[in-house]
Amino acid sequence: DVQLQASGGGLVQAGGSLRLSCAASGFTVDDSTVAWFRQAPGKEREGVSCISSSDAKTYYAQSVKGRFTASTDNAKNLVYLQMNSLKPEDTANYYCAVSVEEFCTFYTGSYRNWGRGTLVTVSS
C-alpha cells in the first residue's frame, strides 16, 4: 500500500528556512519519480520540485529555483525539501507525491497517493 506523509511545516519569518520531510512506504524513493507540490488558499496546486528516476536529475519551478533544494535519503526512504530565503508567497500546504511516470512532470494527473500535506506559513 503506497503512502506518503509530509511533515516539517510551520510558521517562519520572511528570509527564514524550513526543511520538509516526506516519509514514503509501499515503494522505494530511490527508483521512483517523486515530487513536491504546494497549494495556497484559493489557488491551484502547483509543482515545486521533482526528482526523476529516469535521469536522476532534479527539476524546480522557476519561482523556487535557487532557494529550494530537494533530495532523498534512500536508506530511510525519505524525501526532503530544504527551503531557504522563504517569501510570504511561499505560504501554502505542501504535499509530496509519487509519479506513475519515470520522467518529471508537474502535471498533477501523473501523481498518486498524495497523502496529507504540511502547512508552511511565511510572515512578512
Image: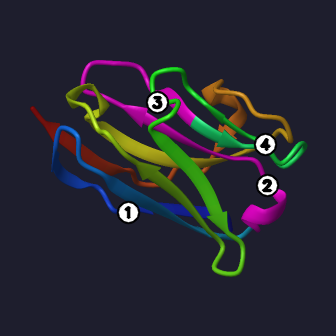
**Which is closer to the viewer, label 2 or label 3?**
3
Considering only order in the chain, which callout, 1 or 3, is on the residue closer to the N terminus? 1
Q: Residues within 10 Å of mark 4 (few under 14, many from 20)?
A: few
Q: Earlier in the sequence, mark 3 or mark 4?
A: 4
Residue type of the residue flagged with mark 1: Ser
Looking at the rendered image, the quarter that the N terminus falls into is: bottom right
Q: Are marks 4 and 1 in contact (CB under 8 Å)?
A: no
Of residue 24 and residue 49, the one placed in the foreground of this image is 49
> Which of the two labelled residues, at mark 4 and mark 2, occupies the earlier sequence position?
2
Q: Report the mark closest to the observer, 4 or 1.
A: 4
Q: Residue at x 25, y 34 (%)?
A: 91
Residue 68, above or below 116: above
Q: Return the residue at label 4.
A: 57
Q: Earlier in the sequence, mark 4 or mark 1?
A: 1
- Residue under pointer 2: 32
Q: Look at the image and name its color scheme.
A: rainbow
Residue flagged by tag 3: what amino acid is it? Val
What is the spatial separation of the Cα atoms under label 2 and label 3, in whole angstroms? Answer: 22 Å
Q: Which mark is residue 64?
A: 3
Does dot 1 land on a helix, a strand or a loop?
A: strand
As for residue 41 lying within the magenta part, the answer is yes
Among the two numbered marks 2 and 3 on one chain, the one whose residue lies closer to the N terminus: 2
Element class at badge 3: loop
